[in-house]
Image (tube, rainbow, N blue to C red):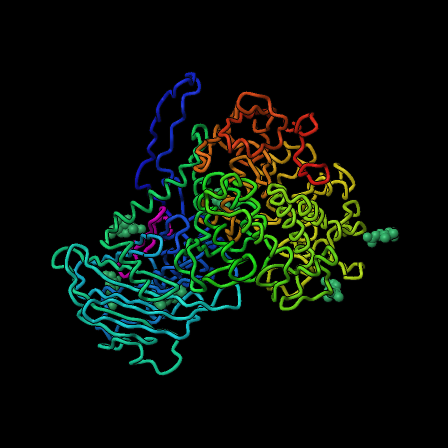
Amino acid sequence: MVMHYRSLLLLLWSSLLAAGQSPSEAAIPRITDPASFVNPFIGTTNVGHVFPGATIPHGMIKAGMDTDSPGNHAGYDSNPIYNVTGFSQLHDSGTGGSVPLSNFKVWAYANCTAFERCPPSLANRKLLRKVLSDGSADDFASPGYFSTNLTNGIRVQLTATRRTALHRYTFPSGTTQPRILIDLTNDGQRSSTDPQLIIDPETGRVEGGASFAASFGPGRYRAFVCATFRGDGYSLGKPTEYGVWLNNFPVKGTTDIRQVYYGFQPEMGAIFTFNPAPSADTSIYVRVGVSFISTSQACRTAEQEIPDFDFDRVHKQSRDSWNDVLGRIQVDTADVPRETVELLYSSVYRTHIAPADYTGENPNWRSREPYFDSLYCNWDTYRTLFPLLSLHDPVTFSKIVRGMIDIQKNEGWLPECRGATVQHYMQGGSNADPILGEFYVKFHKHASELGVPALDLYNALLADAEKQPPNWNLQGRQVEVWKDLGYIAQDMFSPGGANTKQVSRTLEHAFNDFSIAQVAKIIGRRNDFRKYLGRAGNFVNVWNANVSVPDEPSIVGMMQPRFADGTWNYTDPRHCSIHDPLKATCFLNAVRRDGFYEGSPLVYSQYVPQDTAKLIELQGGVDAFVKRLDFIFANDYFESTNEPSQQMPFMYHYADKPGLSTQRSRQVIAQYFNTSTHGLPGNDGAMGSYAAFYLAGLYPLPATRQFLLSSPFFKQISFHNPVFKKTATIKAIGFEGNPPDGTGGKVFVGSVTIDGKPWHSNCYIDWDVFEQGSTVDLHLTDDISVSCGTGEDALPPSISTGGYD
Ligand SMILES: *[C@@H]1O[C@H](CO)[C@@H](O)[C@H](O)[C@H]1NC(C)=O
Ligand SMILES: *[C@@H]1O[C@H](CO)[C@@H](O)[C@H](O)[C@H]1NC(C)=O
Ligand SMILES: *[C@@H]1O[C@H](CO)[C@@H](O)[C@H](O)[C@H]1NC(C)=O
Ligand SMILES: *[C@@H]1O[C@H](CO)[C@@H](O)[C@H](O)[C@H]1NC(C)=O
Ligand SMILES: *[C@@H]1O[C@H](CO)[C@@H](O)[C@H](O)[C@H]1NC(C)=O
Ligand SMILES: *[C@@H]1O[C@H](CO)[C@@H](O)[C@H](O)[C@H]1NC(C)=O
């Protein structure tokens, strides 16, 4: 993929010397068009499943190209060997499971010899893209825009507002019968039932809808479409030919699917022939409104959002909205390659693709509250995605929280996984809890002005914590077992849910309760605080001190499955790692259900963010803990692609060896992340925010006021927070660039000052920095043996050392 930079980077010297600044503190050049550093194609082949099409930040509409790649979860695959099947309106980005959405593809024909000879079915219409001289596909993408050239000579351009897509099809010179198809039924899973479709032969307007399968759960959803056409620079007039199509046959003159529908048909839609432009090449706009409520709502929002079919205006507005959100993070680009800046802004960009703002499109109940969907699973996002929103996009964060609380009020429990308006399967515990906790711990002083009533938030948390749902696999937790035993026993079934992931869910439930404790503390519920902080310590109940890694007896003590009577089952610590002799996986569809989800017992033996000090004690002290971390990295137990491993490179901090964390986290970036289409190690999920934190030299501890501290990949990075109206800046004093393989370099934090005063730790900073808009000076050294400091509170907090009292 070649990135064409439409506009050169504009480096404006913003007000050179603000009052009171000394000349040496002259402002660095402000990046005014950060969108120009975004490469949407990162991770668009080779299982990244990234969506590179046109969308606004958190937009419902994600208009993009669909291919017949086996990895077309986001529709697209940048590998040009795959055929293009259409340009559809809804996508997710970076997911696994079954292919989500990809509804309502649009397609264009330049030269079928007759209306009836245009091949409408997916298999018969598909085509390759043009290929550039370097072998990459002739595709271009930038925030809010996508374009391609098909081998039939048609150029396709896409842009979007929140609920409406605008497509532009430019036909080859001399095209006399430009034709356009709307595909009603072929979503990503080809799962439609119950189609309805009506064509207006006067205007060419298409209204329709169908029911489709959810991608990661048992439910189905209905979606509706309203498509209208306009000539670019000429009056299109009435379509010269029109009709419904069925499988591979256009039926000329039909206007209603019921005229041709006589039972289940896998493929159907509408097809038109239009007048060409009288002079010059023909371009036709297709405006596609989508709704989860009704066709009339799809038509109404399309008319409101894009009344003028003005492609350039919509594109500019979309890009402006991206620059607004991306520009709140600023870096000094001096002394780093352009690729590093691209990696940062592209990672932040992907953080804002999902969750998606479906406000006004919730078919399940009426509410004035925001409604966000495409939550991935909260298990994926609580660790880094929401903490990144805390730094620079708290208003969006507050709306997502409001939407989650509204779901709890209407469904009884907070959502976990959710997509296409329906519940999806559970991954961890009830991981909305740390998301609400993150919001409340950081923004409680502003919660009511942001529309989040403290009591509603707290009651929603208590519902997760205390109320057994009919099916924990779709919402809530396995509450009764958790309350009775303090762990999820391997031999105790709760109604509904499948009997899996008992050990990893125990660890998640403990962390979920930790985040509830942090909220209870702020609102002054002392008894609840003690209760939930106590439950946050329940991870010890699945710690079996006698299990060691086969052939490595010195690494002893492991998280293990346990029966209700207190006796233990055994899962090989190598389970579902690359060293697993049984080659088992621990994904949702795993054949062997050995208690763990997307991480080996060895990985989970390092997964207690709320009390790492206790883990160190259980493992036999600091040396054993460091030895275990080293063993995990040296033997590839660390899994860059799966969330339970994400904190691990930073965990040397807790052993007072922050230099090792800095080096490990930089090695992870060097080894697994780059700006190529292969630049992600696995499904993107929330990896954008994880990479962005590593590049910023921070790792968040969700639902707390602390961030683990390393050094940024830039001389300076700043975060503007629109709720506090403050900008926090982290400066790397003595910065000399980043070692390409992440090893060594003058990158280690020797000492820290905040607003000119010495800070008591080199290993973490507090939320106050962002609340007050402080300047953090990191004095760098090339000495990897730096420490966290000498004072009592130099190490990052843990429950058992009194850190969260
Ligand atoms: C692309 O589609 C064409 C036409 O159907 C077909 O001949 C070709 O084999 C397809 N290519 C791939 C990689 O599927
Ligand atoms: C497609 O072709 C047009 C010229 O017809 C060109 O301007 C454009 O750069 C090409 N590539 C893309 C991705 O639009
Ligand atoms: C349609 O047009 C394309 C591009 O001009 C050309 O390559 C192709 O052969 C044409 N197909 C037919 C059936 O005429
Ligand atoms: C570990 O082994 C010792 C000695 O055999 C035994 O006393 C202890 O109960 C075992 N602990 C666990 C958790 O199985
Ligand atoms: C004990 O673990 C084994 C291996 O994971 C598993 O097959 C078995 O079902 C477990 N026993 C029970 C009673 O859950
Ligand atoms: C990017 O990373 C992938 C996967 O690790 C690797 O195959 C590729 O060569 C890297 N590309 C560049 C330009 O470094």
Q: Residue furthest bottom?
A: 262
- The residue lying toward the viewer, choosing from 178 and 227, is 227
In the picture, measured across the screen, residue 792 lies left or right of residue 220, that is right
Residue at x 27%, y 61% (from the top left corner): 152
Q: Which residues are magenta?
A: 130-157
133 magenta-colored:
yes
Rendering quarter of residue 286: bottom left
Across and down, in percent, residue 395 comes to 44, 44
Rendering quarter of residue 124: bottom left
Residue at x 32%, y 60% (from the top left corner): 289
Across and down, in percent, residue 560 comes to 74, 55
Up/down of 784 relative to 446, above or below: above
114 magenta-colored:
no
Across and down, in percent, residue 35 comes to 37, 41
Any part of residue 47 in sight: no
In the picture, measured across the screen, residue 371 lies left or right of residue 527, that is left
- The residue lying toward the viewer, choosing from 467 and 375, is 467
Rendering quarter of residue 18: top left
- Report the label total: 0
In the picture, measured across the screen, residue 534 lies left or right of residue 778, that is right
Any part of residue 614 in sight: yes
Up/down of 445 relative to 492, above or below: above
- The residue lying toward the viewer, choosing from 199 and 593, is 199
Across and down, in percent, residue 653 comes to 65, 35
- The residue lying toward the viewer, choosing from 58 and 751, is 58
